[in-house]
Image (spheres, helix red, strand yellow):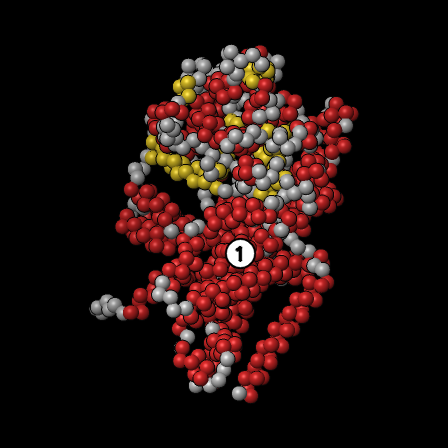
Amino acid sequence: MYNIQIRINAITRAQSVLCRKEERLKNKKRWKVPAFCLAAVLLAASLGGFPPAHRGLYNVLAREDVITLRVCNWEEYIDLGDWDEEERMELDNGVDILGENALYKEFEDWYYETYGKRVQVEYSCFGTNEDLYNQLTLGDTYDLVCPSDYMIMKLMAEGALEPYSEAFFDQEKEENYYQRGVSPYIAQVFAENQIDGESWERYAAGYMWGVTGVLYNPELMTQEEASTWAVFANPDFYRQITLKDNVRDTYFSTLGYLLQERLTEETFINAPDYHERLGELMNDVSPETIRAVEEQLAGIMGNIYALETDSGKADMVTGKIIANYQWSGDAVFAMDQAEEDGVYLEFAVPKECTNLWFDGWVMLKNGIGGDLEKKQAAEAFVNFLSIPENAVRNMYYIGYTSAISGGEDDTVFSYLNWCYGAEEDEEDTVAYPVGYFFSGDNEDEDYVVYTTRDQVGRQLYTQYPSREVISRAAVMWYFNEEETRNINQMWINIRCLDVREIPLWCVLLTLCVLAAVAAAVILHKKNHYYE
Amino acid sequence: MGVFRFTRKQLCIPYAVFLLCFVAAPLLVIIYYAFTNGEGQFTLKNLTGFFTSPYTIGTLAYSFAIAVVTTCVCLLLAYPIAYILARSQWRQKSVIVLMFVMPMWINFTLRITALKEILTVLEGNLAFHPFLNTIIGMTYDFLPFMILPMYTTLLKLDKSLLEAAADLGAGPVQVFCKVTLPLSVPGIISGVVMVFLPSMTNYVVLDMLYNSTYIMGSLIGSFFSAYDWHNGSMIALILLLIILVFTLITDRYAEEDAGNRGGALL
């Protein structure tokens, strides 16, 4: 009867203990008595639910030479194929794209064709970064996972990650699609940022990326009003905007509002070390700053509609709210959905700063366990997803922005034109340069999308933010143990009812009611004895 | 060699194993976490921390408030319906009962989503009445659990007792107060238990109806997202104890009352 969440968590724990035990058993005695294994499997199935049993059974039956790759990704974060024929995409560069099967299934065939070895992908999903982390600490083992920036940093700092091999970085090799195709911008971010003296690129390969901002209804809010983190405190939109039910995002946007003046000062923006200082300011989690944010956030909470996790997109369409905090990928998805209902939404990136986020593939030490074949297969999986056609398939399916620009291959850019390019007879077009992402040079005339005027501020701008937006983007770092505790305490202070705030009449009323009930019960009993 | 003899007792083994793995073992894990700190040492800090923080106590009060109000509203709504239904001579009353049960066949998140739209039409902006919305949502969700046990108890009520009371000169109000109501107490209590307990922890309703204030369930979740198993487990344990105490009290009262009444009436 106790809370369902803790019950499920405890069950997971019990399950993983069972599962580990079964695996140990299997490793020791596989050659000896297969029947014993089967019994163990059946026992595990009856005790621990199906997944571990399935794994065990598979290993008993499978041939020895199959590599098993355990991949854990966000839900709905890979193309699952099964497209209709009319969804076939014919890009300008002559590439034809149609998703037939799930990408992780197609990988198995591709791997066999490319390397002549069999691989079997065990694909599973996680809901939040914290869930994934908890799963890992509870003993679940995966070889390749796709957490967000700060979780990658946390895992890296804890020494849980396996570095990519030398061979993975060799740009000469044809099948190294990631290194040959990753966007110069993303590659630069990954090379510049370090944890304990080691840059991210050694441990992580970018998958999807974006910024955060405000998705708003332009009929009810101007672009100027939406382009600031102060919008959440704007009394004109009292109870009409949502924030994310997520402490990191809320902290970032509130801090951006708190530091508004400083962040928009000319001298600050034009300083030579602007970027470093922006990063420092937006990652300030000192107790004093947390207190200041808490105070500010308490005020904001009285002005917003609510905190939401996933309902914001639908609520924009139904008109419950007129703006919400959004990650760029979800914003694209929301705009597409709203368009189908005849509602046109726009995305604004606050003038103070924005949070540059990304999800990346990392290998786990305890999953790979020194198995070089497995490591190679994991790297091949990343490379397979980085094949420009596959990157486009993912983008089309998920709506997020791939970290892959394609290098010499222009499939990704063609996809951009296919999505947003203006028709040839269109007269009122705007040039939208995206060279910073594709070639590293925003002046590059090869990478300019000519689009209709109404696209500015909409999907194209959201999916590929302009150079100017990117210049004020800051990565948000992971919090260490103490910082996590402080921030969580702040969050609890904001979310929980403070017992000291309960008005006196409420307490008195409750006491009266309790006294009345007690009196009634006692009287009732007394009467009863007289009978 | 002894022949394997099948006895009825052995049918319990699957459930015993289930109980051991998924009730006893997780509970032990929770107790372990609740009384240890990050280094695995025994500590009572999680316990004292809970009772000294104004925010956790406030959350407890808020959860209680929601649960109590929901239970009262459900009781007030359900008793007359159950009473009328049970007493009516209408043959098709099982159809009506079915109508009350039917919403339970639809997934509750779906129902709450629909409720959200209805409430928006009625209120305009849901953000102004989070507490009221939560109560409506919870009541909507748990009402069948209140109606059903009361309906069954009232249905089983021996009508000759009512007739006897009337024959001995009691008016309808007196009959209700002195006979029907006391005899339906077991039904009321099981209804109250079935509504009160889940409404203290069901935070999905709050999330979906935009009530951003934490209740006990979501508070536990927030500790888990901050990788703090210890405080989260402690809160879960405290919640478990509160529920246990509540169940013991209601059970005892129900038994005592049923016993006494039965004796008095005979």
Residue B63 location, x and y as percent? 59, 59
- Type of amino acid under label 1: Met
- Judged left or right of residue A242, residue A333 is left
Name the quadrant containing residue A294.
top right
Residue at the spot 60% in from the left edge and 81% down from the top edge: A523
Please name whichever residue, B81 or A197, is drawn nearer the observer in this view of the structure.
B81
Residue at the spot 63% in from the left edge and 39% down from the top edge: A241
Q: Residue furthest right?
A: A267
Q: Is residue A182 above or below residue B101?
A: above
Residue at the spot 40% in from the left edge and 25% down from the top edge: A87
Q: Is residue B70 above or below residue B156?
A: above
Residue B23 location, x and y as percent? 45, 61
Q: Is residue B78 above or below residue A459?
A: below
Badge 1 marks a residue whose secondary structure is helix
Q: How many marks?
A: 1
Residue at the spot 57% in from the left edge and 38% down from the top edge: A319
Q: Is residue A458 visible?
A: yes
Mark 1 belongs to chain:
B
Please name whichever residue, B194 or A261, is drawn nearer the observer in this view of the structure.
B194
Q: Residue furthest bottom?
A: A530
Please name whichever residue, A86 or A175, is drawn nearer the observer in this view of the structure.
A86
Name the quadrant containing residue A504.
bottom right
What residue is shown with label 1?
B138
Residue A315 location, x and y as percent? 56, 39
Residue A48 location, x and y as percent? 39, 53
Please name whichever residue, B238 or A55, is drawn nearer the observer in this view of the structure.
B238
Q: Is residue A254 visible?
A: no
Q: Is residue A104 above or below residue B147?
A: above
Q: Residues within 10 Å of mark 1 (few under 14, many from 20)?
A: many
